[in-house]
Image (cartoon, rainbow, N blue to C red):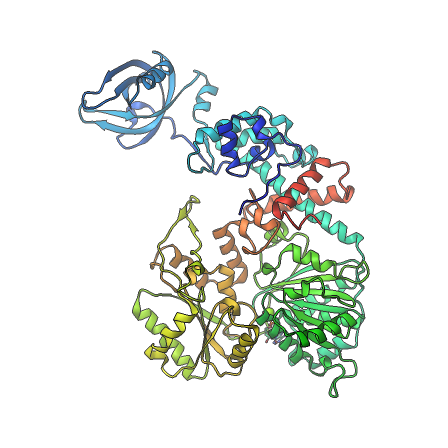
């Protein structure tokens, strides 16, 4: 899909500055204007080998040397067409030949013109041995004429920027394009006030771009990049600051009533709230009791008890005369949340029924696959306000769903919802008011990562889990080692014999469906190069279920399947059977990824585990060991033991701490993909920032940007920043984020 592109505002179009070959090269990276080009950073730098004397070099070594030209000779080759150019150079002590094999006479001329006798040059190359002459030589070295001064020598040893390359684009083209741009470095738009840059001890933008693209030292590249990183962080934080300022000006329903429902629920809970649940409950209450919309990110590991915290807040909304909505990423989850709330609330959810509590409300479920009759009734309850709590999927976001008075929205599993969803919900509040929003996530992110990516939310963390969970132990299983596979299924069978249940998760539904076989995510090595490990095609739910009927270990086990091509009703039926213990082994896709609660399940087998993200694997294994029975998770892979996928899976198997995993994930994928592919918005498009490495810059930029926005919320005195923000939002999400 071609992405719509517009240049950064007011920036010089590259077509006016560069020759066509150069502007085309830049265009192939989506770079069309001067400002964007000067911020297009090299992927890495090559630093020449340290300068050496010719008498201390050995065969096979990469060397750099400052030498002068002693003699230049060329001759036609005897055995084939072409020429040999032999240049003898000396460092004053030792001589060495440089040899070039050239096909055209004008190549010979070109080298000769650059190598007059006596010229001082630096040579970079690998030392070889010339058997014929029995001496060391360097074949096809890079060389460069230099001035015989300290600066000249330093220049020769400068780091060379390596830009990302596409087919048919020469590095030299990218370099010459950028070097032309540098001549206009003083005219670049500077979104961060000069004074802020100076106070933080950073080079100003024009200097920074020179340091990035034509550095003299490695330290230069760091100083230059520090500016670009800071600038990126600053623009992001200015966006968050503006959003928060906007919220401060927006009215919201005040959710401060102290009862009756919330205290009644507290009395009915079958357990005591943990201190964490109480504390965070109090913090949320304080926030939603204000007359401006609050946005909270409630993070806590799988099973940390977020749902109750959210429910207590939702009851506050109902007690205050408003409604609350709970959004889940899938129908299965929405249905489960609905069941959970109904169970926790008991008679408090049965308004209008004989056995309902006098203060009761209604909890309605609204999903896309509901049949029209039930749906109409539900919609009526939502519109009239009879339903205090509405649980649903994206269907809740549909235009025609009108709430009587929506005071609070709780979103479960934030990574499936983009900023656009959050914004759309904001518009569903009563009469010009915006509802409060709580986003729940089981994929905790480190503090600065949160600041950099969801900096418009207040992050609250539930970091203790209610005690009674037995926990999960994870193992990596190699499909290619039959003993291991056997042992895995045996273990599953033992659990079934003990009355437990087993989940088997596949990466796709049907193996016959070629399009369905998503490639395994690539793994980057230390130099950021892609590794392309060979893997078998992913196994499908349908075929796996068939194969399991033939495994001797599982004889007699009751199998069920669950995947996205079943109807909502079918899915509900299967999940119901699983919950009631009528299925021993449920083979499914990740429809069960989040939140599904089968306390009796103790084994989670994930086939082709390398195809799943870190947080997905963590979520999946969190499905077992939820009750009193210890859980076992198997990450089954066709990857080779000891190789990248296998080691990666082992790292996950050995890490249980959600925060550590989040870091592992970040380091592997880079921050650009922080919260999952489906996340729309700012997170996806970080260019220079690494949310772990650049933690300090992010914190500083936040402080500075919030101060700038506080002093001038509309940024009338900072038009360049205002423009950069617009560009950034459009890049992040061409359609939605502008609102
Ligand atoms: P999360 O949504 O954070 O993954 P849940 O809210 O689904 O976790 O809670 C996991 C399980 O723990 C649920 O069965 C819930 O009823 C139970 N639970 C929640 N809070 C407590 C508590 N304070 N004490 C005991 N059990 C709790
Ligand atoms: Mg949950």
**Left of 584 or right of it: where is 413?**
right
Question: Farthest residue in the front direction?
Answer: 372
Q: How many tags in the picture?
A: 0
**For residue 420, which quarter of the picture?**
bottom right
Q: How far across and how far down the image is residue 382, in percent? A: 74, 71
Q: Going 61% across and 29% down the picture, which residue do you hit?
A: 206
Q: How far across and how far down the image is residue 208, in percent? A: 58, 31
Instruction: For residue 651, say whether it is visible.
Output: no
Question: Farthest residue in the bottom direction?
Answer: 354
**Left of 737 or right of it: where is 147?**
left
**Left of 630 or right of it: where is 110?**
left
**Left of 213 or right of it: where is 364?**
right
Whether 387 is drawn above or below 64: the answer is: below
Whether 358 is drawn above or below 671: the answer is: below
Q: How far across and how far down the image is residue 661, in percent? A: 51, 59
Instruction: For residue 336, say whether it is visible.
Output: yes
| Front in this rendered view, residue 724 or 394 | 394
Question: Farthest residue in the top direction?
Answer: 117
Q: How far across and how far down the image is residue 204, in percent? A: 63, 31
Quadrant of the displayed image that contains ligand 1: bottom right
**For residue 457, which quarter of the picture?**
bottom right
């Amino acid at each position: 899909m071609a992405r719509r592109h517009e240049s950064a505002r007011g920036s010089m179009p590259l077509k006016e500055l560069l020759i066509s070959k150069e502007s085309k090269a830049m265009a192939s990276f989506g770079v069309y204007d001067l400002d964007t080009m000067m911020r297009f950073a090299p992927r890495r730098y090559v630093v020449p080998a340290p300068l050496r004397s010719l008498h201390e070099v050995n065969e096979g070594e990469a060397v750099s040397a400052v030498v002068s030209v002693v003699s230049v000779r060329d001759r036609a080759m005897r055995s084939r067409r072409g020429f040999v150019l032999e240049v003898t150079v000396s460092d004053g002590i030792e001589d060495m030949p440089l040899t070039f094999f050239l096909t055209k006479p004008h190549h010979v001329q070109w080298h000769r013109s650059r190598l007059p006798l006596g010229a001082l040059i630096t040579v970079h190359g690998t030392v070889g041995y010339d058997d014929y002459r029995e001496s060391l030589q360097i074949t096809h070295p890079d060389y460069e004429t230099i001035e015989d001064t300290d600066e000249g020598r330093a220049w020769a040893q400068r780091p060379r920027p390596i830009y990302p390359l596409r087919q048919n684009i020469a590095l030299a083209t990218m370099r010459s394009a950028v070097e032309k741009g540098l001549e206009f470095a003083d005219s670049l738009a500077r979104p961060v006030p000069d004074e802020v840059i100076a106070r933080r001890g950073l080079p100003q933008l024009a200097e920074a771009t020179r340091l990035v693209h034509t550095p003299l030292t490695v330290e230069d590249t760091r100083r230059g990049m520090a500016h670009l990183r800071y600038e990126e962080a600053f623009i992001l934080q200015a966006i968050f600051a503006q959003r928060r300022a906007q919220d401060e000006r927006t009215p919201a329903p005040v959710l401060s009533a102290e009862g009756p429902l919330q205290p009644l629920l507290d009395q009915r809970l079958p357990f005591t709230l943990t201190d964490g649940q109480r504390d965070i409950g109090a913090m949320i209450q304080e926030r939603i009791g204000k007359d401006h919309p609050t946005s909270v990110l409630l993070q806590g590991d799988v099973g940390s008890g977020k749902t109750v915290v959210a429910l207590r807040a939702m009851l506050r909304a109902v007690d205050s005369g408003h409604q609350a909505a709970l959004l889940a990423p899938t129908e299965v989850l929405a249905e489960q949340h609905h069941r959970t709330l109904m169970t926790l609330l008991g008679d408090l959810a049965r308004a209008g029924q004989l056995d309902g509590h006098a203060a009761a409300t209604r909890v309605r479920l609204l999903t896309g696959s509901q049949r029209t009759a039930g749906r109409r009734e539900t919609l009526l309850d939502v519109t009239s306000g009879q339903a205090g709590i509405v649980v649903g999927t994206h269907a809740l976001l549909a235009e025609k769903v009108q709430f009587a008075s929506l005071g609070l929205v709780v979103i479960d599993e934030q990574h499936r919802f983009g900023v656009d969803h959050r914004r759309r919900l904001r518009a569903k509040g009563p009469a010009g008011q915006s509802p409060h929003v709580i986003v729940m996530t089981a994929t905790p992110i480190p503090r600065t990562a949160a600041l950099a990516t969801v900096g418009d939310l207040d992050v609250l963390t539930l970091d203790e889990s209610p005690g009674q969970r037995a926990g999960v132990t994870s193992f990596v299983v190699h499909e290619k080692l039959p003993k291991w596979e056997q042992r895995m299924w045996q273990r599953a069978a033992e659990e079934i014999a003990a009355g437990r249940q087993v989940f088997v998760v596949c990466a796709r539904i049907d193996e016959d469906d070629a399009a369905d076989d998503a490639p395994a995510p690539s793994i980057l090595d230390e130099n950021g190069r892609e590794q392309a490990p060979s893997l078998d095609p992913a196994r499908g739910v349908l075929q796996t279920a068939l194969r399991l009927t033939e495994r001797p270990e599982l004889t007699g086990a009751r199998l069920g399947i669950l995947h996205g091509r079943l109807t909502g009703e079918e899915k509900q039926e299967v999940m119901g059977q699983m919950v009631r213990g009528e299925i021993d082994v449920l083979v499914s896709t990740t429809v069960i990824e989040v939140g599904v609660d089968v306390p009796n399940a103790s084994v989670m087998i994930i086939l082709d585990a390398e195809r799943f993200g870190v947080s997905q694997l963590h979520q999946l294994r969190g499905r077992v060991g939820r009750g009193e029975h210890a859980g076992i998770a198997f990450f089954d892979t066709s990857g080779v033991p000891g190789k990248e996928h296998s080691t990666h899976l082992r790292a996950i198997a050995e890490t249980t701490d959600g925060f550590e995993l989040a870091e592992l994930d970040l380091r592997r994928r880079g921050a650009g993909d922080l919260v999952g592919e489906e996340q729309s918005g700012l997170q996806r498009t970080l260019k220079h920032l690494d949310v772990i490495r650049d933690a300090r810059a992010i914190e500083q930029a936040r402080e500075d940007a919030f101060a700038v926005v506080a002093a001038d919320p509309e940024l009338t005195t900072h038009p360049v920043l205002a423009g950069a923000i617009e560009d950034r939002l459009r890049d992040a999400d061409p359609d939605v984020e502008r609102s």
